[in-house]
Image (tube, grey):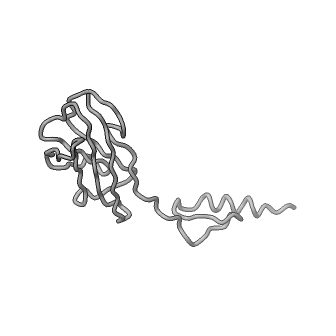
Amino acid sequence: MKRHKPLLAALLCLSMSALASCSPAGTPSSSTPPASATALSGTDPAPNATVTAPVPMIHVMFNSKIDPQASGVEITTADGSKVDVSEIMPLGDTMLMATPKTPLPAGQYTVKWHTVGADSKPLEGEFAFTVQ
């Protein structure tokens, strides 16, 4: 009679909780994989995009939950002048929306953003776009 220990071990491992991990031999290991880091997943307008005027809002999107209280968005024109922005609003747990007090007319803009991810690590970045 053949023994199917590797197959049995793999089946046992698959049947365990999603938080458990297995060694290459198929036996459960005691450590869990690290949580993925929060990262920028997209913006609207997209980086380096050319969009049609007027632009009424800017969206900054992340791959996991962020802390809206620790977040900010700053929009500047090509000459470095700050654009007046209403309060930055969270949309769900993973998106920030910045609404200029007046829609953005034709010009070049840079958006600088910062937040803190669910992993408690600060994030920051910037992107530029053109409004025609």
Image location (x, y in percent) of residue 101: 12, 41
Image location (x, y in percent) of residue 112: 28, 50
Quadrant showing the N terminus: bottom right
Please determine whether, in this image, residue 91 is positioned above or below residue 10.
above
The residue lying toward the viewer, choosing from 130 and 13, is 130
Quadrant showing the C terminus: top left
**Residue at the image position 15 percent from the left and 49 percent from the top:** 87
**Residue at the image position 65 percent from the left and 62 percent from the top:** 12
Toward the right, the furthest residue is 1
The residue lying toward the viewer, choosing from 12 and 85, is 85
**Residue at the image position 30 percent from the left and 30 percent from the top:** 51
Please determine whether, in this image, residue 99 is positioned above or below residue 70.
above
**Residue at the image position 35 percent from the left and 65 percent from the top:** 120
Left or right, 89 with reference to 19: left
The residue lying toward the viewer, choosing from 37 and 85, is 85
Residue 42, image quadrant? top left
